[in-house]
């Protein structure tokens, strides 16, 4: 079994298991709409440590994530799978945005609303630009790779759609029931500390 830390929560994973599946099984705060085709990109994660224990980026990730984002450690959770015992530490895009929004509403010591709002807007703007720049070509690639039917109806069956709704409910419940973190000086401090611990453990 491999050790994977998603949003500062330690989880176990089987070799070959995708980050998205690990996160969903543990009700982690992660987006998932397209049932693992890579089309929706809501399951983006940033690998903070242990990238060498994951599969290399595949063509779907390279289509949707610019080289600069791949270099920063961004991956699609539905495509990146465990290839070693780890440890691996990631933060989901959904969680990072949540922490940035929380910091904008309740600024940590030493920061201001304006600075934190600016960081959040910069992040959202950059992600939008990344998508708009590559969208026409990437859409054609997605249709050629996974088919128009999978894009229009990603679940393909009522059973899979029902599981999707169940998993969404678990993630929402877990997220709403999680206590709001005490505002640190850095809203991502807990996650960065977990990643540092992972790096120390793998040395």
Image (spheres, helix red, strand yellow):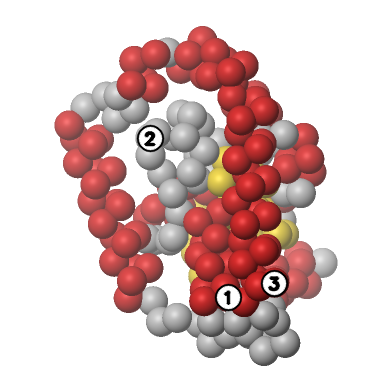
Query: Mark 3 highlights which residue?
Result: 115
Where is residue 17 drawn, in percent x and y?
Answer: 50, 44
Is label 2 in a helix, a strand or a loop? loop
Disc 2 and disc 3 in contact, CB within 8 angstroms: no
Q: Is residue 154 left or right of residue 71?
A: left
Residue 49 visible in rendering: yes
* Residue at the outermost right position: 203
| Mark positioned earlier in the residue sequence (3 or 1) | 1
Please identify, in this view, whether the residue under mark 3 or under mark 1 is nearer the observer.
Answer: 3
Closest to the observer: 74 or 137?
A: 137
Is label 3 in a helix, a strand or a loop? helix
Cα gap from disc 2 to disc 1, whole angstroms: 31 Å
Q: Residue at x 57, y 62 (%)?
A: 96
Query: Mark 1 highlights which residue?
Result: 103
Cα gap from disc 3 to disc 1, whole angstroms: 10 Å
Disc 3 and disc 1 in contact, CB within 8 angstroms: no
Cα gap from disc 2 to disc 3, whole angstroms: 36 Å
Where is residue 73 drawn, in percent x and y?
Answer: 72, 49
Closest to the observer: 154 or 26?
A: 154
Where is residue 102 drawn, in percent x and y?
Answer: 52, 73
Query: Mark 2 highlights which residue?
Result: 35
Vertical comparison of 176 with 155: above or below: below
């Amino acid at each position: 079994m491999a050790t994977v830390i998603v949003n500062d929560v330690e989880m176990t994973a089987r070799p070959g298991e995708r980050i998205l599946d690990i996160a969903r099984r543990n009700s982690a705060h992660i987006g998932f709409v397209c049932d693992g085709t890579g089309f929706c990109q809501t399951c983006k994660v940033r690998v903070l440590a242990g990238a060498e224990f994951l599969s290399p980026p595949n063509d779907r990730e390279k289509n949707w994530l610019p080289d600069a984002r791949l270099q920063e450690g961004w991956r699609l959770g539905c495509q990146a799978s465990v290839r070693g015992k780890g440890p691996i530490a990631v933060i989901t895009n959904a969680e990072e945005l949540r922490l940035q929004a929380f910091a904008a509403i309740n600024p940590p010591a030493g920061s201001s609303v304006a600075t934190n709002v600016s960081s959040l807007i910069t992040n959202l703007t950059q992600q939008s630009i990344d998508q708009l720049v590559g969208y026409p070509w990437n859409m054609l690639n997605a249709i050629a790779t996974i088919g128009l039917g999978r894009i229009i109806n990603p679940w393909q069956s009522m059973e899979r759609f029902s599981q999707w709704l169940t998993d969404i409910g678990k993630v929402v419940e877990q997220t709403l029931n999680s206590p709001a973190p005490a505002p640190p000086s850095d809203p991502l401090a807990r996650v960065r500390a977990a990643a540092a611990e992972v790096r120390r453990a793998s040395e």
